[in-house]
Structures are given as C-alpha cells and as structure tokens.
Image (cartoon, coloured by chain):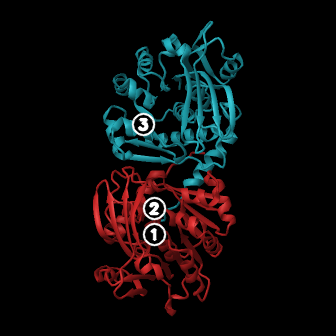
Chain colours: A red, B cyan
Amino acid sequence: MSLLTVGTVAFDDIETPFGKAEMAIGGAATYISLAASYYTKNINLVSVIGDDFPEETLNDMRSRGINLDGLQVRKGEKSFFWAGKYHDNMNDRDTLDTQLNVLATFDPVLPDTYKTPEYLMLGNLTPDVQIRVIEQLEKRPKLIALDTMNFWMDNALGSLMKVIKMIDALIINDEEARQLSGEHSLVKAAAKIMEMGPKYLVIKKGEHGALLFHGDQIFFAPALPLAEVFDPTGAGDTFAGGFMGYMSQTDDLSFDNMKRGIIYGSAMASFCVEKFSIQRLLELDDIAITSRIKRFVNLVNFDAKL
Amino acid sequence: MSLLTVGTVAFDDIETPFGKAEMAIGGAATYISLAASYYTKNINLVSVIGDDFPEETLNDMRSRGINLDGLQVRKGEKSFFWAGKYHDNMNDRDTLDTQLNVLATFDPVLPDTYKTPEYLMLGNLTPDVQIRVIEQLEKRPKLIALDTMNFWMDNALGSLMKVIKMIDALIINDEEARQLSGEHSLVKAAAKIMEMGPKYLVIKKGEHGALLFHGDQIFFAPALPLAEVFDPTGAGDTFAGGFMGYMSQTDDLSFDNMKRGIIYGSAMASFCVEKFSIQRLLELDDIAITSRIKRFVNLVNFDAKL
C-alpha cells in the first residue's frame, strides 16, 4: 500500500559524548522514509529543501523507492538546520541553534499522484502544514499517524487540537503526553488524549520503550538495552517510519498487527542510534532486521505457565 | 523449599500526593515475607523489633506461614522508623527522618531450624549483618539474592563488595547499578557487576520495569501501567519477595523459570503500590494474582510472525 509522509529534510549539527557531526543529514521525513523503505517501496515524500542539500542523498532515497516528486527545491535558499547537544544520559538534549530557512514559508503541495495514499505519516511540523496536507487528499487514508512536540503545544495549541481530531494515531513522548493531558499517570493521560480524537496513542519513552493504547488495550514494547548509544537523533522518527512502513506493507489494522508494527518500529529505532545521522539506516538488510526482531522476542518472551 | 529472609520489620511515616500514613507497618522483611507467602508457606524471618510493634501484624504474618522464631523482640526499645515524602512523579522521594532504634545494635541470630534454607533473600541492611547471616548457614542455599542501596555503596563499600561475592543474584535499581559500576549504560554496568561476583543481576527501573541479566542473556519485565500509584513504599521489597517466593515454590533455576519469577515479582509489586503500607498484600488471593499475571502477558505478548 502507498505511504505518504511529510516532514523536514534537513541538516543537523550533533554533539554527543561520543563525538560531533557537522551538517549531518537529518530531518523527520528523511528518517521516516528511510526506515519505511525497508518495508515498502511505495513511498511519497513531501518536504522542502534549499539548493544546498546533497544530490547524493536524494539519489540514495530515490534508489530505495522513495518518490521525491513532492520535494520542493528552493534555488538560492538554505535547508532547515538544527544544532543540538546531548547530555551524558543521552535522554536529554539542549537545542543550540534552529534556522528555519526554507521551512519558514513552506506550503506543502501534493502532486496529483500523492493524493490517494492508504497510509499517511505526518512528521513533526507546524500543525497548520499537517492540516494542509490532509486537506489536499482526495480520499481518507486507512491510517493517519501524526508526530508532534511540546513546542506546538506551547505555541499552536488551537491548530494542534484541530489536526489531532483529523487523525487516527498520535505518536508523542511521555512528557508531551503529560503536557497535552495535564495528567501525570500515562494511563490517565492516554484516556484523555484518546477523547481528543485519536483512536490510537503511542507514547514513546526513549530508552524505556513505548506504549500503544487503543480503547482499553495497552501494549508495551521495550527499547533494546544497548551497550552504546552513539546518537539518538532521529530515533523517534525512525520508530514512526518503521511502524508506518510495516503497517502499509501488511495492510492489516488489527491490534495484533499494530503490536508487531510497534516492535518493528522499535527495532528500526534501535539501529538508528548505533551510528551518527542516517548512516545505520543506509546499510541494513532483511537478515539484520530479522535478527534484531528476534532479540526483541527473546527480551520479553516468557511462558507464564498459568 | 524453605525461604529464609532477613531485613527490617519497622514503622513508616509516608506522605504521597494522595495522602499521609503515620506509623504504618513497613520494613523490607515485612514486604518480602508477605509477598513470598502467596507462593510458599515455608518462610523463616530474621529481624529485630521493639515492644511497640503490633502483635496483630505478627499474628497476621504467622497465619500466612511466616515463622518468626528468628524475630528478636527488645523490651523497652523502639522499632526501626523511617519517614519519607514522595514527589509528584512518585519516582523520587525525600527521607524526612530515620531512627535506627533497635537496628543500631542488631546482631542476627539464626535459630537452628533456620540454618539450612534452600533459598535466601537478604533484604536491604548493613552488609555486615547480611554477611553474619550467611556465615551462620550450615549449607550453601541453592539461590542467595541480595538487595542493597546507594547508602551502603557510599558508607560500607568494602563490606558490600565482600557480601556481593558470596551471593548469586543482586537486586538493585538503575541508579545504584550505575553508581556501583561507574557505567551509564545498563548493559555495560551489568557486565561489570557480574564480574564482581553475582551470576544474576536484576536492575529495577521503578515504573519502567526491571531487567534480568545472566551471562549474555537479558530479560525485560515491564511494570504494569497503572492509573493510580498510591504508595510506592515497599514495592522493591515486594518484587524481591514475589520473585524469591516463586523461585522457592518452583525450585527450578533455569533462565526460563527465573523470567517467570521476575514477572511474578513484578505482579506482586503492582499490587503493593495500589494502597498504603502493606494493606494490599494482606487481601490478595490466587484468582487476583493469576488475573494480574494475565495482564502482564497481554501487555508484552506479540507474535513476531518471523
């Protein structure tokens, strides 16, 4: 099934306790589409870049089945740029610089061939841009997932609440779930957030895994305990991309299949953090992914003998 | 199989965002033995109290198969007392008061009938007392587990390192594992700590679950997502008691059975936090426990379809 994704395609300066990377390839839509490309070759990407973005990376993406007809390239302008530094615990980070550049005036325009996706992944962006993408669709996708962040809760809550009503699955982290709901307990937070619109809620807890809520059902996917986390940048986007890539490949919206999607997304995220930037996402294959999924099975599998 | 446990039997003043309890029943050995009593009726307890401790609670414990021949009662003295206040997040707490009382001069004396346990749970206490218990045993138990805390790492590291070499399974929380090993990554911390002696390491992560390490194997048990956590006091001890109670009941040291033990311990801990003090641990039955274990199965169970 076709997967449409919107989000940034950008540069990052990243500093972690393990090293530095300058002008590394980043952006939510980059990570989402690369992760999804291991599950489906029917991916349409909507974003905007300047003429500073390397053609080599775009060709890499095209060769993986990522259609870039919806990627606007602005002559004489610069791509979105973010710089951040991670704390020693790798869970917290400080933003050192944000340069919107082409993103400041981004108006997503969907090519006609993009307007009937079965699956839609709205990467973290201003809610108004996410709404503009939904408004251009000619039919309702089977599953619309949306990632957002606390910045939009602070600065565009009205638009955020509007787009949240239009989607099926909201993907946020634990602190964002607490902020959006005003509840500390994630169980209570989930109940309140699902009343705002989404039938599914994924709460990402970084190194502590992720929770999937749907009605009264809860599923927990662990994060893989890793000896080294080199660079957490893009892990959340990679999780979302793996999840939506798997959902569009399997085209099965049962809760059991959603669980698998969450595990497959977690597996992709566990690769992402092993190297800087998108490096690890460029070198995987089915054998590596299957082997990683088996590690998740072994990690949580038990026979209760009830 | 017989389970011997040593630890405090004490009073707690507890303040949480949900309320206050004064002179509530507490103590590591209290929680450990009550949790274990749902799995085995062959429990011997070693501890010390003043003559202020309620006979009713002791009778409750005896009626659950907990042998108190090793519980010293000091006339005219007071039981150990701890007062603490939990933060809104329920993960952090401030100690407001600690009165050692009878614990200041506690010398554990094992009755002869206590000296050949198959399973030994050393609750959090000064490492020298834990060593004194091991030294009085007439044969090596099949499994010795030990709980400790950062206080002993700061103040009695030599004795702690000595007792750690004498045991099989160390049960600590994530921050303690980081402090003991000097490693932030829990995978690296576990490798270093297992080199110090224990073949098994359990790292408790509170609301984020627990990890069991053994050689190259890792098992992760989630914490049950709860709408309300009323009082986390004793949850770690209850976890250890459920785990060791299950191990002594089943008498099977395979890694698969250890996994079940960790899940059963997690289930008992999930009950403990639902009410103040030991209240919830006094009112459970097999039906409630089995139903709770099923919730853990549903929470993490997935079919990878590999």
Q: Quadrant of residue B42?
A: top right
Q: Is residue A164 visible?
A: yes
Marks 3 and 1, Cα distance to the nearest angstrom? 34 Å
Foreground residue among B93 and B288: B93
Write down the chain letter for disc 3. Answer: B
- Against A96, residue B237 (above or below) is above
Residue under pointer 1: A242
Q: Amino acid at mark 3?
A: Glu
Residue furthest out toward the bottom: A112
Residue depicted at 35% across the width and 60% down the height? A231
x and y percentages locating residue B139 in the rendered image: 41, 18
Marks 2 and 1, Cα distance to the nearest angstrom? 8 Å
Residue under pointer 2: A266
Left or right: A117 as drawn, with respect to B162: right
- Against A107, residue B133 (above or below) is above
Residue furthest out toward the top: B75
Foreground residue among A299 and B105: B105
Write down the chain letter for disc 2. Answer: A
Helix, strand or loop at disc 3?
Answer: helix
x and y percentages locating residue A160 in the rendered image: 60, 71
